[in-house]
């Protein structure tokens, strides 16, 4: 199933699922109020709610509550997640990005997956404008996949971690590279260079849809990024050096994970301008449209605007 959050013509916001490429079911309406009208509350009791949703799904086309997708405004499927951890799990990206800074790989990177916390209150959805920070000259996209936690757990073992995943979506970890470069000299991870926007969407695909595509540490899913229609990045989720199960196990060591938290993969190899180099493409500017595409997960589009365009 593909879960979405959307705004209707009357301005109200709800959540539900796609029943085909053109229609959406409002799960609150379709269930007579049994299911909540937002995904965060849905995830709080995901197992129970999924049973109800699964029972309605085959009947969706006959329920009468279907909305045309082109008449809705899709929002981030999880507009305010409980947290957002972003990992650093694709070796090719890590190697190349470090080489660009004159650094070699360190053995510790291979010992365990590492992550940083980003701003879970700055989540953007499909079609939303991304404001270029006023102080930023080197704006970049990052092509990633993310998983959504669907069950509470602590000290989760790797071999059980998959049970805690609700689904997956595309993630764009927008980066102000010049701000990031300066602040990381202090010895801490990226913060101000990352906290202005992160895009997710256009929907969350439940994990059962991807299970047949498992390969390596990930899935056999092609990943692409285009700027103004020009293909710049190509990779595959199967190239992950650490699986999402390993990331979840690491994140939950001594810490409770809750439904509605986001775990990002980090950037796939070639998945950003920093890695490609300015000789391949300049830094992003207002007016640029960035499209991230992951097979089976859809296309996530956003346009860059100047901060002066914000009303």
Image (spheres, rainbow, N blue to C red):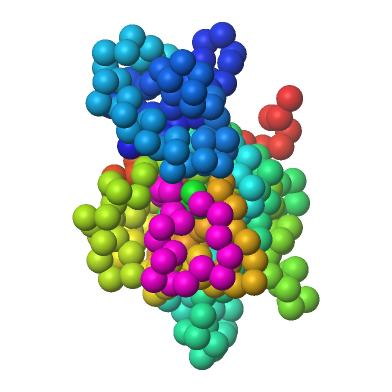
* Magenta highlight on residue 154: yes
Residue visible at 55% across and 60% down in the picture: 153
**Looking at the image, residue 68 lies above or below residue 19:** above
Residue visible at 56% across and 54% down in the picture: 152
Q: Is residue 55 visible?
A: yes
**Looking at the image, residue 298 lies above or below residue 97:** above
Residue 176 on image: x %, y %: 65, 56
Residue 32 on image: x %, y %: 46, 15
Q: Quadrant of the N terminus?
A: top left
Which of the pair 23/179 is nearer the observer? 23
What span is in magenta?
A: 151-171
Asked if residue 294 lies left or right of residue 280, the reply is left
**Looking at the image, residue 274 lies above or below residue 51:** below
Extreme residue in the left direction: 212
Q: Quadrant of the C terminus?
A: top right
Which of the pair 74/36 is nearer the observer? 36
* Magenta highlight on residue 77: no
Residue visible at 46% across and 79% down in the picture: 95
Asked if residue 78 lies left or right of residue 60, the reply is right
Residue 211 on image: x %, y %: 27, 55
């Amino acid at each position: 199933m593909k879960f979405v959050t959307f705004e209707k013509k009357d301005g109200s916001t709800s959540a539900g699922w796609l029943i085909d490429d053109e229609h959406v079911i409002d799960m609150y309406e379709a269930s007579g109020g049994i299911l909540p009208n937002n995904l965060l509350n849905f995830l709080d009791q995901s197992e129970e709610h999924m049973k109800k949703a699964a029972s309605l799904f085959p009947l969706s086309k006959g329920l009468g509550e279907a909305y045309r997708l082109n008449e809705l405004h899709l929002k981030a499927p999880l507009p305010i997640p409980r947290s957002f951890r972003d990992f650093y799990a694709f070796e090719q990206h890590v190697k190349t990005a470090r080489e660009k800074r004159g650094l070699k790989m360190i053995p510790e990177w291979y010992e365990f997956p590492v992550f940083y916390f980003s701003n879970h209150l700055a989540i953007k959805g499909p079609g939303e404008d991304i404001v270029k920070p006023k102080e930023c000259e080197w704006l970049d996209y990052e092509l990633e996949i993310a998983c959504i936690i669907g069950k509470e757990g602590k000290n989760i073992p790797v071999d059980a971690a998959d049970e805690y995943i609700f689904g997956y979506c595309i993630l764009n970890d927008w980066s102000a590279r010049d701000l990031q470069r300066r602040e990381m000299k202090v010895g801490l991870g990226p913060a101000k260079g990352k906290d202005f926007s992160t895009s997710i969407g256009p929907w969350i695909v439940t994990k059962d849809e991807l299970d047949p595509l498992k390969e390596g540490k990930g899935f056999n899913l092609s990943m692409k990024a285009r700027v103004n229609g020009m293909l710049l990045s190509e990779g595959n989720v199967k190239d992950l050096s650490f699986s999402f199960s390993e990331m979840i196990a690491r994140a939950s060591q001594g810490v409770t994970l809750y439904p509605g938290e986001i775990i990002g993969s980090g950037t796939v190899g070639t998945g950003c301008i920093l890695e490609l180099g300015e000789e391949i493409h300049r830094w992003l500017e207002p007016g640029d449209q960035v499209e991230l595409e992951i097979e089976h997960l859809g296309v996530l589009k956003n346009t860059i605007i100047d901060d002066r365009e914000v009303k």
